[in-house]
Amino acid sequence: MKRIILCVAMALMVSVAFGQKDAFKQLADIKGVEYKHYDKQAIQQVAATGKPLSFGSPFDSYIQLGGGQDSAEFLGKMDDVMVFKTTDDKKAASQLKKMGFSFLKNEKYESMIDVRHAGVTIKIGCVEDGDKVKVINYGKDKYGTSLFLVVSGSAELLNSMKKGSVSID
């Protein structure tokens, strides 16, 4: 009987751990949301070009990761980037924002940037977990297009971001 209880308890712990890790992937299930995933290898390929990791129109003019002289070093600190984007579907954009930030309720989310200018909203924050960090980027333009980025990497990534390896124009 003790073995059964122990096995059930371990199975629940594993399923909870995997559920939290993959929670953001649920955003891809929202109707009207486009999803792209960049793993470590894809990020390294972009880093080798010396170009920034960008996320398509209209966000290329607002948010880019890397670029310039230290691009390869900065992008090398990333393990994973998940990109969730809507076009002009306001319902999907609203759900994306609400659901994305709801995953952060029980986390120690620290807001770093909260900018609203000329109809554009940009929010950047992070969740630190020991030597790993998740950086959350949310953007919305005046036409209703929304972007939700989840960037996972080393704690060094956060220090680089604070030094200006993310451009927001």
Image (tube, rainbow, N blue to C red):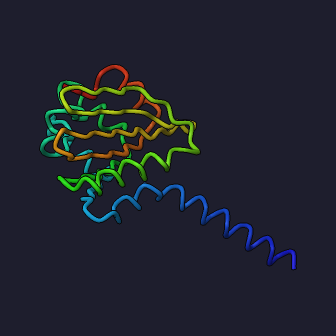
17 relative to 68 in the view: left or right: right
Whether residue 121 is situated above or below residue 150 in the rendered picture: above
Tell me residue 149's x, y (percent): 33, 45
Q: Residue at x 40, y 59 (%)?
A: 25
Q: Residue at x 26, y 45 (%)?
A: 44
Q: Residue at x 24, y 32 (%)?
A: 66
Q: State the residue in front, 18 or 90.
A: 90
Q: Residue at x 56, y 42 (%)?
A: 107
Quadrant hosting residue 72: top left
13 relative to 25 in the view: left or right: right
Task: Residue at the far right: name it.
Answer: 1
The C terminus, quarter of image: top left
Tell me residue 137's x, y (percent): 34, 38
Q: State the residue in front, 159 or 123.
A: 123
Q: State the residue in front, 162 or 115.
A: 115
Tell me residue 128's x, y (percent): 52, 36
Quadrant hosting residue 19: bottom right
Q: State the residue in front, 91 or 85.
A: 91
The N terminus, quarter of image: bottom right
74 relative to 154 in the view: left or right: left
Q: Total marks drawn?
A: 0
Tell me residue 109's x, y (percent): 51, 36
Whether residue 40 is situated above or below residue 113 in the rendered picture: below
